[in-house]
Amino acid sequence: MRLNRVALWLVVSAVMLVAMPVEAANSPQVQGTKCSKTGATRVVKGVSYSCTKVGKTLKWSVASKKTTTTAVPRELAAIELANKINSFIAPMRTRNQAVPIIEYRFGPSVSEADRTMTRQLAEAFFKYGSFPQLADYRNAISVALTNEELVATTAGWQDTSNRPIFGGSYWGTGVYALTLQNFTGHRCPLGGTTMADANECAANGNGGDLGRFRTRVNVLHEISNGGKVALMGFDPTQDNKNKERLPLWVSTGFSNVYGAMLLAVVDGATYTNPNISGDEARRCRDVPISLSSIPGVFGDAASRCRGTGTGDFANELLIARFGLDKMLEFIKESRSIPLNSTWTNWSSHWSSLFLKVFLQSPESFEKDVETYRLAVSTQSILPEGFLDAKSRT
């Protein structure tokens, strides 16, 4: 019996020796033993120890491991803003608002593809959009490729015979909230008003991807002009120019960016805006928002940059920082601002409202727009915290 107990003890001891890690078996006891100098270090069997004070005694302790952090590369300016704006599109995707009856008038030269595209975008504007007030009015859309077609398709709504070059516009007519489109003018940079111009534009690919983008955005852009008027609390069917209570760079640039946001919803894609490009940044680098606020004061350059080139940059920055709802708040509260054609100063009438909503003076914001424009034109990154929603001097 005694021999069996001895044999059992030998077996258990052997198992314990096998199970014990080789390192533990061979490693000397260092942790907790005394040392003589604070801060001293030693490495034993690949383990680092440091001499630290424990109570009144110096003892060896396992040194804390240093963690290595890998810096995440910052994104280029345009990509960083696009990603921020994309986060504000998610609520739009979940909407399923009622689409009102829309009356369409198409010129005979408008293709079936363009008719389908127009209907799809107009319906998406109401289904996913941020201007449900506009659905309470009768809505009509005219689409033409030439001025002759434009005059015919708008007859009874508006006399367009005195408009030699027409790209697109919203007018209140007393009956409808109306959107007029000359698709050629948006597809091709110098799109004209005749059938020959339309044919030449088509032969050159209708402006390619950029032409397609700008045409689609402009459909949404013009309908949103009526939406802005309704949001302010005015009747969008009246020809009262209430959208001109906004600085031109807000009125035009916002509708471009908002249109691009809706396209992301329609296409089931992430937000992108090819108007935010180095070419556009350089084209309008001498036209800051102060020169793109009042109509007819600073000439053609300011007029051509109130949307693409300046307005898109400025509105992207505001939406990226504060979200779409804050832009809508600014537009709604602008109802008490006089028409911009009466302004004697580019920002004094809306400065206090801008400061309240966006926590920054227009003059300070103008500098930030130029920072963004420069970063896009040089393909560089923005300063740290540039997109934070905070008060700025």
Image (spheres, helix red, strand yellow):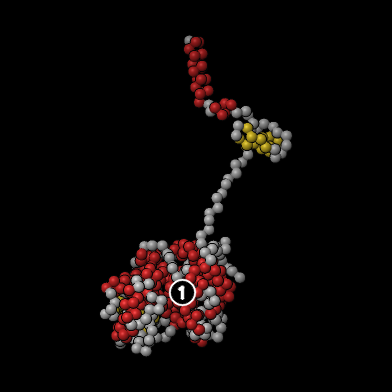
Nearest to the observer: residue 384 or residue 229: 384
Residue at (49, 16) in percent of width and height:
8
Decide if residue 129 is in sight here. Answer: no
Would you identify the image quadrant in which residue 48 lies? top right
Residue at (49, 68) in percent of width and height:
278
Decide if residue 277 is in sight here. Answer: yes
**Percent position of residue 264, x then y:** 39, 65
Per the image, the residue denoted by label 1 is 308
Residue at (51, 23) in percent of width and height:
18
Residue at (42, 79) in percent of width and height:
229
Neighbour class for label 1 at 10 Å: few (<14), some, many (≥20)? many
Count numbered badges in the picture: 1
**Percent position of residue 116, x then y:** 29, 71
Nearest to the observer: residue 163 or residue 201: 201
Is residue 264 shown left or right of residue 289? left
**Percent position of residue 239, x then y:** 39, 86
The residue under label 1 is which amino acid type?
Thr
Nearest to the observer: residue 247 or residue 307: 307
Element under disc 1 = loop
Nearest to the observer: residue 289 or residue 279: 279
